[in-house]
Amino acid sequence: MRLFSSFSLTSKRIFLFRRKLDGLIFGLGAFMLMLPIDTSAIIFGVFLAMGIYLLLFRPAKSLRHLDKNYVLAVVIFSTACFATNLLNGSLPEDLRWSSYPLYHLMIIPLAVGAVLVRDPLRQFVLGTRAGLVVIFLWGVAEVAIALWGGADVRAGALRFGLGSNAANAAFAIAFLAVVSRLNVKSPPALLADRRIFFYLTLISVLASQTRAVLPVFLVGVAVDLFSLVRNGMKGWRPAARQNAVIWIALLGVCLGSLWILYPVVSQRIHTTVDEIASSLDRTGTNTASGISTRLVQWQAALNLIEENPLLGRGGHGISDALAKHGAPHNQEELKQYTFVHNFILDETIQRGLVGLALTLGFFGYCFFRIYRRGDASMKENVFLMLTLTFSFGLLHYLLVIDRHVALYALYFLLLTTANHGWRPPYSRDS
């Protein structure tokens, strides 16, 4: 009897230790998400493997942690999209592009694997906030070193991207900036403010020179100004002298960072004005620019979609197909891309109007479910995330990049499951 009691006590201590340890590790996964190493993928992979194990051997208890309506929506969306690729004949050559909707299905066991984490969404948000500080320091330091080394400040010649494509990095950073605005329970003092990391991220985005993500920050400013006017200074005033010093120091860092980035931002503004003027030039002498390239791609995409508007044609050989449907003098330019800088056209090319309806329907359902069941910060978050989705997605390749799809899958899973079980329900029927 004493042996059994001792074993139970030891087991309880192990679980209590695991509860703390798993929470820290889960937060570390979010912290490392944007860094150019595989640590984050390994961490979430471990939780995913644990979730698969629990679903296989303890299915009844494991399923309680999931929002079953969300899981059903994921199953319908993923399998229907994959079936569409089967019907349009793009498989098996188009396995990579057609597998992106399956991310949402494959990542579901992660919520079950994090069963010993008291509030996975809290850990994810805190890890994200800490990671955004590192990205901010890294971005400003990289641009400063490059400028002092005499780097060319022309648009595109000096763009911060964490070692990858600057536009893709900017989207992921802005995505995590929106996530960082979520309310969390009992955050550490240095990670307590839910707005400050959002504005730090703006400086990282300016360093990337990616214009398509800036609207989400403008909308964020408008939301915060409205909140400030409605509530006065309540919730915005530093609670103590120490916090006031931190705010002043942070303001100084931000102003210094903007001074460092001024040459880059100024050049990008001039480039944007030149691109608009070039695109409006009707003399036929306009040079290639970001805007004119997109207009050429969109026209070729519309011509390509007309061949199979209902089910699409998949992504295999998309470069040559777009070139074939473009003007002769644009064919070499079109062959450089496997996307058309517009997620609606990209999705319609992949899976036709059927796939577009499935994607918009699934995203709409997820955002609506989070908005209806979430607290005030989640409702605000949905609004900002929709702004980012359309501002970036209508000008870039949103859903044909692995990391982008994985971020959406994590976001939907964590927020819907948090409202279902990790946190008290926010509505009577949840």
Image (spheres, rainbow, N blue to C red):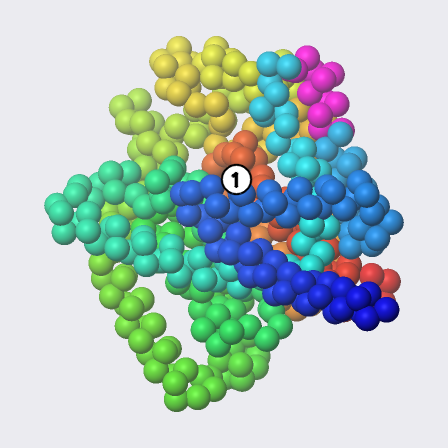
Identity of the residue drawn at 75% across and 23% down: 83
Locate residue 86, reporting x and y percent.
72, 17
Determine the main secondary structure of the stretch shown in magenta: helix
Q: Can residue 109 be seen in this view?
A: yes
- Residue 187 falls in which quadrant of the image? bottom right
- Closer to the camera in the image, 132 or 205: 132
Identity of the residue drawn at 17% across and 41% down: 152
Q: Tell me, yes or no, whether the highlighted magenta stretch contains residue 65.
A: no
Q: What stretch is highlighted in magenta?
A: 80-91
Q: Is residue 140 above or below residue 297?
A: below
Q: Is residue 224 left or right of residue 147?
A: right
- Residue 74 falls in which quadrant of the image? top right
Q: Is residue 367 visible?
A: no
Which residue is the site of mark 1? 403
Locate residue 113, reporting x and y percent.
69, 50
Inspect the image, locate mark 1, and give the three-letter code of the amino acid beneath it: Arg
- Closer to the camera in the image, 50 or 133: 50
Locate residue 215, reporting x and y percent.
47, 53
Identity of the residue drawn at 24% across and 51% down: 143
Q: In which quarter of the image is the N terminus?
A: bottom right
Locate residue 32, reporting x and y percent.
46, 51
Q: What element carries label 1?
A: helix
Q: In which quarter of the image is the C terminus?
A: bottom right
- Closer to the camera in the image, 85 or 65: 65
